[in-house]
Every structure is written in C-alpha cells, then in structure tokens.
C-alpha cells in the first residue's frame, strides 16, 4: 500500500512540476506566498503497548495444581452430636456409651441384672463435607483470581492496539496586491503499528490471557465451586496448615495467593515517543504549491457579483458618528455659561431619567430572573436533598441489612467453629480412643507374638535340648560301645598275646626240653664214654659241665628272661605305640566324627530352625491373615451395621428433613404470601407515592414552564420596551440634532444678517 501512494505522489509531483515549470503566474504566486507570514507545525507521536507477563506466567504455573485439587478435593466427615431423650435415639454408638459413662446424671435407673436405663443419650450424626479450611482457601483464591483476570482482560481488550499519530498544521497570511490571502490547513493520520515483532508477541500474550481466562471460568463453574458456593471465604493472613505447606499443589496455590495480593500494577504500560520536526525545504515548497493550488481553486469557483442577481440577502449598515456635545458647546462662543449649564443639566437629567428607568427595568428583570432561578434552584436542591435522603435511607437500610447479615454470618461462623471444635474434639477423642485401642491391640498382638515366639523358642530349645541329649546319649552309647569294643579288642588282644606268649613259651620250653634231652643224651653218651675212658676226668668234666651247664642254664635263663623282658617291653612299647596310634586315630576319627556330627547337628539345627522359622512365619502369616480376615469380617460387620445405621439415620434424617422442609415450605409459603401482600401494599404505596411525586413533579415542571414563559414574555416585553426606549432616544437625539442644526442655521443666518447689517452700516 505504501508503494502505491508513493508512486502516485511521484507521478503527481512530476506532472505538477512539468505544468508549473516556467509559468510566470505560478512563480509570482510562489514569490508572494514565500514572502508572506507562514507558520508550520509537524508533530509525530508513537504509542507502544507493553504487557507485563509476570502475572500471566504466575497464573499459568498454578493452573495444573488447581486442576489437580479440583479433580480430587479433600473431604471430611462432619459429625454433629446432640443429646436427645432416649425415645428419640436412633443408634447407640461407642461415643454414646462413653458420653453416658462421663455423664452419669443421665442414667435414670439401673436394673438388678446390671442393665442401665438412661433418660438421655448422645446421638451422633455423620455426613461428608467439603468445608475444610484448605477447600475454602481454594474457593476464595479462584474467586479472587477470576476478578484479578477479568479486570485486566477488560482493560486490555477494550484498549486499542499500538497507535501512531502524524499531523501537520499550516497557517499563512499573504499580501497579494490589494488582496489579503489567509490559508489554514491541518492534516492528521492515525494508524496501528501491527507490522512489528512486538505486535506478534503481544497477540500471543493476549492468546495466553484468553486461555487462562477460559480455564479460570471453567474452574468457577466446576462442581467443586457449586458445592462451596455457600461457604465462608477465608481472610488474610492465610493459616499455614500442614496440607498447605506440605502438599505441592496447595503450596503453589499459596504462592499464587501471595503474588496476586502483592501485585498492584495494571498489567501493562504504554510507551509514548513524540517528535517535533522541522519542515524540510522540499516539503515547504510542496506546501506552497498546495496553497497556490487551493487559492486558484477558490478563485476559479468564485463568481462575480453580477452573477448573484436576486440571490443575495441585502442588509444596510448605517455608519454612526460619536458626537461630543461638550466640545461643540465649548467651541460655540455665542452661548454663555448659564445656558451651557442648563443644557448640560437637562441632558444629564434626561440621561439619568432614561438610565434610571432602564436600570429599574433591568433590576426588576434581573430580580425576577433571580427569583425564578432561586425558585428553580430551591426545587432542584429539594429534589436533590430528597434524593440524597432517599439514598441515605437506602444506604442506611443496606448497612443495617449488611450488619445483620455480617452478624448472622459471624454467628453462623461462631456456631460452625463451635461445631467444628466440638467435632474436632470428638474426632480427637475418637482418634485417641481408636489409637489407644489400636495400641492395646498391637500390644496384645505383640504380647501374643512374643509369647508365641517364646513358646516357639522354648519348644525349639527343648527340641534342641532333647536332640542334644539324644545326641549325647547316642555319642555316649557309641562311646560305651566303642569302649566296650576296645575293651573286648584289648581283652582279645591280651588273650591273643597271652596265648601267643604261652604258645611261644610252650614251644621254647619244648625246644629247651628237647635240647635238654638231646644234650642230656649227648652228655650221658659223653659221660658214659668219658666215664668209660676217664671216669675221674669224666666226673670232673661232668662236674665242670654241670657247672657250666648250670651257669649256661642260668645265663640262658637270664638271657631268655632278658629277651622275654625286652620282647615284652618292645611288645609293650609297640602295643603302647599302636595303642597311642590307635587312640590318636580313634581320637582323630572321633574328632572328625564329632566335628561332622556337630556340623551335621548344626546343619540339622539350622535346617530345623529354618523349617521352624518358616513354619513360624507361615503360622504367623496365617495368624496375621486370620487376624486380618477376622478384623475384616468385624469391620465388614461393623461397616454393614454402620451403613445400615447410617442408612436408617439418613432415612430418619431425610424423613425429619422432609417434614421440616414441608413445615418450612408451608411457613415459607405463608411468609412469602405475607411478604407478597406486604410487597404489593408497599408497591401500591410506592406507586401512589411515585404517581403523586410524578404529578407534583409534573405540576412543578408546568409551573416552571409557566414561569419560564412568563419570564420570556417579560424579557420579550422588556426587550421591546428597551427597543422602544432606544427608538425614542434615537428619535429624541434626531430631534435634538435637527433643533441644533436649525439653531446653527439660525445663528448662521443671524450672523450673516449681522455681518450684512454691519457692512451696510459701514457703507
């Protein structure tokens, strides 16, 4: 678009330059305009709108946490307690029994069998409710967030886009011969600067604002807000409850609350850039050309006076001279001082009289106008005062209603807080009782588990002791058997050794006996031969042989004994070594067997312990499962009973509420009917009062119109009278003028006659 008008302007300027180049009249006009008085003013203003996105980002960060809370709002059981007579009690709970135990004055009698008959009992009503502090905080936050966004969105939506302003003013006064040319021109243009990048950014920010506005509107119309519409909003400062501080969703909502209460800005700012530029020489020449063209256009379309025959409106303007009577009287030397004073006095009296009469009429007209205006003002002030009084009365009634409403709300809040405190107290007591019962159950469970564990440990120990005892008995038995076996083996070995020894001794004895028999036979043969040969030598030799034999026998016996001793010692040492080796081997075997037995026993004990542990674990799990199932069954029974009781209670409450609702509806219908009748009466009274006020206002308006007409008629009459007086004064002045002219003519005539008579006398 910019290229199109630039092209057109270039073509236009080129054509105009070609047409005016060398034209003497254009050069003459240019010189006249440039030499005249010319004033130029060129002004540029640029507006830039900048949106603060801090509040947009703060709200966007909290959209998801609010949505998470609205999808899963927190609830609590409202428990209302009421002491009623025993006939009206629907359900007897543990709280009722606990309350009765604490308030024994409600017991009317105790039967012989121990049964108690109370006169009054605590009745407990329970229902779900959303009205906890955190939900009220979220309800108030969404309401304030809606107002916060709507205020800024309405301002941003109604505000125009970034604008720019360009203006040019030109005032010229040119003298062209006997002609004065006055030229005034003002051109201004406004346009939106939507071609920059910031504009796109602002549009994207506006899209984000529209999105969060839509989301917050959805939050406002959610089921949660409908449920909470009758709750009391929270007031700052916000209580830092555990839920608000530890729940990340509520924590972000608290941050948003602090932000919107600390954010006092409008949400956007406008940057204005202005410039006052000087008009360039080429621009000034173009403006001179425009002025010359407009002058020629005016002259071209202005017709001469002769062409307006019968078309012009005619009006005569008589020039008037201001006469100074004082100078004329002073310059007239023929009048004496008395006549001059008389003329002055008469003129002054006449002027004073006219002035007084005119002033009197003016004063009367002013007084009438002031009276009428004062009356009108008085009526307006009375109306304003009546309206102010009416508004004050309405405001007073509104304040009274507001005070009553606030008092009711405070009373309701106090009652709610008391109920909440009572509920909290009952809840705490119930929780304490439940906790105590739970601790007792846990303690009993722990005691039973400990007892079972102790019994299991005792059984395991007893079993281990029996196993050890059996093992000891088995080991002792095996040891006894081994000892018996060893003893028998030793006895057998001893018998075998003794038998072998006896056999060896018997063999040695037999061998010795055979040797002895042989030797004896040989000796007998030798002795017989020696005896035969030499009886004496034989005898000596026999003696010697006997001695030697005896010594030899003794030596042999000694040697045999020594050999037997050494052999016995060797055998003993060997037996001892064998016994030691056997004992060592036996000990090693016993140790290995013992270690193996201990290891096996340990493994067996470990296996037994593991099996026992598994059995105990299974038994424990089974017991826990059975306990859980028992508790679940108890809970199910309690829940079923509770639900049944709650259902019965709900039905009773529903019936009571229905009856109460019917009663309230009937009372409400009666009240509405009475209110309608009262409102109809009030409306009729208000209508009659309005009609009366309307009639009075109409009458006052008619009176005011009549007074205005009278005032206008009087003003018109005064104007006519003034005009007549002015005409009379003009007539009087004309008459005086004629008389003065006549007097002057007469004086001139007399003077002429006098001069003529003097001339005649001179002649």
Image (tube, rainbow, N blue to C red):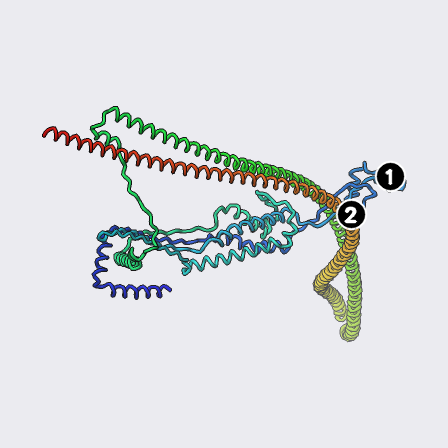
Where residue 239 sits, quadrant-wise, is top right
Q: How far across and down, in percent of the image, does residue 407 sit?
A: 65, 38
Label 1: how many residues lie within 10 Å, few (<14), some (14-19) or many (20+)? few
Q: How far across and down, in percent of the image, does residue 339 sit?
A: 26, 25
**Residue 623, placed above or below residue 332:** below
- Tags 2 and 1 in contact by the CB under 8 Å rule? no
Dot 2 or dot 1: first in sequence order is 1
In the displayed structure image, the side of residue 33 where residue 54 appears, left or right? right
Where residue 232 sits, quadrant-wise, is top right
**Residue 541, placed above or below residue 608:** below
Residue at image mark 1? 110
Q: How far across and down, in percent of the image, does residue 523 sit?
A: 77, 73
- SS state under label 2: helix
Query: Gap in Å between the C-alphas at discs 2 and 1?
Result: 36 Å
Q: Work out which residue is located at the far right of the displayed protein and give it.
A: 112
Q: Nearer the viewer, residue 517 or 372?
A: 372
Q: Quadrant of the N terminus?
A: bottom left
Q: Work out which residue is located at the far top of the displayed protein and give it.
A: 338
Residue at image mark 2? 659
For the point 44% across and 60% down, the residue is 200
- In the picture, the disc for residue 748 is none
Q: How far across and down, in percent of the image, does residue 656 sit?
A: 78, 47
In the displayed structure image, the side of residue 316 where residue 330 appears, left or right? left
In the displayed structure image, the side of residue 508 where residue 117 appears, left or right? right
Q: Quadrant of the C terminus?
A: top left
In the displayed structure image, the side of residue 242 where residue 547 appears, left or right? right
């Amino acid at each position: 678009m910019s290229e199109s008008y630039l092209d057109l302007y270039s073509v236009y300027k080129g054509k105009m330059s070609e047409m005016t180049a060398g034209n003497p009249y254009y050069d003459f006009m240019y010189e006249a305009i440039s030499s005249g008085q010319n004033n130029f003013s060129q002004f540029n203003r640029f507006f830039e709108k900048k949106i603060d996105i801090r509040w947009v980002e703060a709200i966007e960060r909290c959209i998801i946490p609010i949505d998470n809370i609205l999808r899963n709002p927190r609830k609590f059981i409202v428990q209302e307690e009421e002491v009623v007579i025993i006939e009206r009690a629907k359900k007897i709970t543990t709280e009722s029994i606990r309350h009765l135990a604490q308030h024994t004055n409600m017991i009317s009698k105790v039967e012989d069998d121990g049964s108690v008959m109370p006169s009054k009992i605590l009745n407990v009503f329970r229902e779900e409710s959303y009205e906890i502090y955190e939900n009220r905080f979220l309800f108030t936050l969404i309401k304030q967030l809606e107002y916060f966004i709507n205020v800024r969105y309405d301002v941003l939506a109604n505000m125009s886009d970034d604008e720019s302003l360009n203006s040019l003013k030109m005032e010229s006064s040119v003298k062209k011969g006997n002609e004065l040319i006055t030229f005034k021109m003002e051109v201004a243009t406004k346009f939106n600067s939507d071609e920059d990048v910031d504009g796109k950014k602002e549009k994207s920010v506006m899209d984000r604002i529209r999105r969060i506005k839509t989301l917050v509107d959805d939050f406002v119309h959610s089921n949660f807000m409908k449920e909470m519409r009758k709750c009391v909003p929270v007031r700052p400062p916000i209580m830092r409850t555990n839920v608000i501080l530890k729940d990340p969703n509520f924590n972000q909502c608290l941050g948003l609350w602090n932000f919107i209460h600390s954010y006092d800005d409008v949400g956007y700012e406008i940057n204005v850039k202005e410039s006052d530029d000087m008009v360039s020489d080429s621009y000034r020449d173009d403006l001179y050309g425009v002025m010359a063209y407009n002058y020629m256009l005016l002259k071209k379309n202005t017709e001469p006076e002769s062409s307006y025959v019968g078309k012009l409106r005619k009006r005569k303007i008589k020039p008037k001279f201001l006469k100074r009577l004082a100078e004329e009287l002073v310059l007239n030397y023929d009048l004496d001082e008395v006549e001059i004073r008389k003329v002055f006095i008469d003129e002054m009296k006449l002027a004073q009289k006219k002035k007084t009469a005119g002033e009197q009429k003016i004063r009367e007209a002013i007084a009438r106008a002031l009276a009428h205006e004062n009356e009108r003002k008085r009526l307006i002030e009375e109306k304003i005062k009546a309206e102010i009084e009416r508004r004050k009365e309405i405001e007073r009634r509104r304040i009274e209603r507001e005070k009553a409403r606030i008092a009711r709300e405070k009373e309701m809040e106090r009652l709610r807080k008391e109920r909440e405190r009572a509920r909290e107290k009952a809840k705490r007591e119930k929780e304490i009782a439940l906790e105590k019962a739970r601790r007792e159950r846990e303690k009993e469970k722990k005691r039973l588990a400990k007892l079972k564990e102790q019994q299991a440990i005792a059984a395991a120990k007893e079993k281990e002791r029996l196993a050890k005892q059996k093992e000891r008995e088995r080991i002792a038995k095996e040891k006894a058997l081994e000892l018996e076996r060893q003893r028998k083996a030793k006895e057998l070995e001893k018998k075998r050794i003794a038998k072998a020894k006896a056999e060896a001794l018997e063999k040695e004895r037999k061998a010795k006996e055979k040797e002895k028999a042989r030797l004896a036979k040989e000796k007998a043969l030798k002795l017989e031969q020696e005896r035969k040969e030499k009886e004496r030598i034989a005898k000596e030799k026999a003696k010697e042989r006997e001695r030697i034999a005896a010594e030899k026998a003794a030596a042999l016996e000694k040697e045999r004994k020594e050999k037997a001793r050494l052999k016995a010692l060797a055998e003993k040492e060997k037996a001892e070594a064998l016994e030691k080796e056997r004992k060592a081997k036996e000990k090693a075997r016993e140790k290995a067997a013992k270690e193996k037995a201990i290891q096996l026993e340990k493994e067996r004990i470990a296996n037994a312990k593991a099996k026992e542990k598994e059995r105990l674990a299974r038994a424990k799990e089974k017991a826990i499962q059975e306990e859980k199932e028992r508790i679940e069954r108890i809970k199910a029974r309690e829940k079923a009973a509770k639900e049944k009781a709650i259902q019965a209670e709900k039905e009773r409450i529903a019936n009571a509420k229905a009856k109460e609702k019917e009663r309230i509806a009937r009372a409400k219908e009666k009240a509405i009917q009475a209110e309608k009748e009262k409102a109809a009466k009030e409306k009729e009274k208000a209508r009659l009062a309005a009609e009366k006020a309307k009639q009075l206002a109409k009458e006052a308006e008619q009176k005011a119109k009549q007074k205005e007409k009278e005032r206008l008629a009087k003003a018109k009459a005064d104007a006519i009278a003034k005009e007549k007086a002015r005409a009379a004064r003009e007539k009087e002045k004309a008459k005086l003028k004629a008389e003065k002219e006549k007097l002057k003519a007469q004086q001139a005539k007399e003077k002429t006659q006098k001069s003529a008579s003097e001339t005649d006398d001179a002649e």
